[in-house]
Image: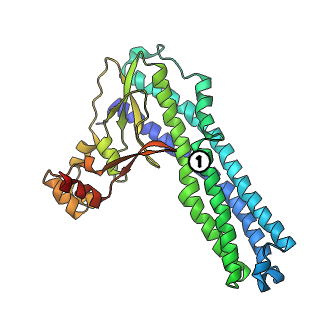
């Protein structure tokens, strides 16, 4: 039966998921409005007879140049809107993360109630400031929306060169924009929002280092949890560093209250208790046989790297790479 602490973490994780879903819905709505205007511009561009007859005049035709400029402005506006909305949601999630950090500590030691120092407003603003100019988020967003603009122009050029009609041109441009939005924009925003939530938790623990000695990583144990997070579940970290994360990581930071005892089933213990069919499906046949023989542990699936922009990150090592670890022993 889950402990009160685990139940609270599950409740909060569900609340975070709901917040993320709402943020993503707003993000998609902003994109759809931009997409609609983008399609109108591409349709108008594809209907210019002189350009269709001679694509080489694309950047010399006044109406075409104006439309291309409008496309660029629309994508820049989307980037600004995404950042503005993300900052607002970051503030909400940062405050929620700080409050949840206090709840988790008090659940371990009820006597802490009233002794815990709340995270100062300046710290919340500092965390949300991580989306500002020069931040990894701002740099990545600039790169992504710049790439989206470049892809749009490239697809327009190629479509016109192939003599495509306006509808085919629209499909070509919108498909490229959709791919970039789903694969790069949405994960970037989700990571920024969840990152603010975690950072606020960590800052709250640091504010109370007379009561908190460190924190423990707690993974969301499910069929979709990556093997690296299951392997690292239960790892303890000092307050001066953030644990390594990956895109869409659902791991929580659980405070280690001085004098209190934490007891959890670790990710490795949880995985070992799952049916063989589940283990085989997650590991693959070859790795499963090595795992069952006791020669391959989940720790072999952990790959940590140092990213110059995002810091320490973790990812799930491929089955082939995990098996190759055995050959090096």
Q: Residues within 10 Å of mark 1 (few under 14, many from 20)?
A: few
Residue 29 in percent (x, y) is at 66, 55
Q: Which image quarter holds the N terminus?
A: top left
Say left or right for 134 vs 251: right
Element at label 1: helix
Say left or right for 188 vs 167: left
Q: Nearer the viewer, residue 62 or 278?
A: 62
Which residue is pictured at 79% across the width and 62% down the height? 70
Q: Nearer the viewer, residue 274 or 218?
A: 218
Residue 111 in percent (x, y) is at 40, 14
Which residue is pictured at 69% across the width and 82% down the height? 161
Which residue is pictured at 77% across the width and 69% down the height? 41
Q: Nearer the viewer, residue 70 or 269?
A: 70
- Residue placed farthest to the left in the image? 293
Which residue is pictured at 55% across the width and 50% down the height? 188
With respect to residue 117, does 233 lie above or below? below
Total marks shown come to 1
With respect to residue 96, does 42 lie above or below? below
Q: Which residue is mark 1?
A: 22
With respect to residue 45, does 145 lie above or below? above
Q: Nearer the viewer, residue 119 or 53?
A: 53
């Amino acid at each position: 039966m889950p402990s009160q602490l685990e139940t609270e973490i599950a409740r909060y994780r569900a609340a975070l998921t709901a917040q993320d879903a709402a943020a993503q819905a707003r993000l998609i709505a902003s994109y759809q409005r931009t997409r609609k205007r983008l399609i109108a511009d591409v349709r108008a561009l594809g209907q210019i007879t002189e350009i269709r007859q001679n694509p080489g005049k694309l950047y010399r035709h006044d109406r075409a140049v104006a439309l291309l400029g409008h496309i660029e402005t629309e994508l820049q506006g989307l980037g600004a809107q995404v950042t503005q909305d993300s900052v607002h949601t970051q503030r909400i999630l940062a405050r929620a993360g700080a409050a949840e950090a206090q709840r988790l500590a008090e659940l371990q030691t009820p006597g802490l109630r009233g002794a815990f120092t709340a995270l100062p407003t300046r710290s919340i603003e500092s965390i949300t400031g991580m989306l500002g100019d020069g931040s990894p988020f701002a740099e990545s967003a600039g790169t992504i929306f710049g790439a989206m603009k470049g892809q749009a122009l490239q697809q327009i050029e190629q479509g016109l060169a192939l003599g495509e009609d306006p509808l085919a041109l629209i499909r070509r441009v919108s498909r490229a924009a959709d791919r970039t939005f789903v694969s790069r924009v949405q994960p970037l925003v989700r990571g920024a929002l969840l990152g603010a939530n975690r950072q606020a938790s960590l800052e709250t623990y640091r504010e109370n280092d007379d009561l908190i000695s460190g924190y423990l990583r707690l993974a969301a144990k499910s069929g979709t949890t990556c093997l690296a997070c299951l392997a690292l579940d239960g790892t303890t970290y000092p307050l001066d560093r953030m644990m390594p994360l990956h895109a869409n990581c659902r791991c929580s930071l659980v405070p280690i209250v001085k004098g209190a005892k934490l007891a959890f089933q670790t990710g490795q213990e949880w995985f070992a208790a799952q049916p063989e069919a589940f283990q085989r499906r997650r590991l693959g046949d070859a790795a499963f046989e090595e795992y069952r023989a006791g020669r391959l542990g989940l720790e072999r699936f952990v790959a940590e790297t140092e990213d110059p922009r995002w810091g320490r990150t973790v990812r799930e090592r491929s089955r082939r790479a995990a098996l190759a670890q055995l050959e090096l022993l």
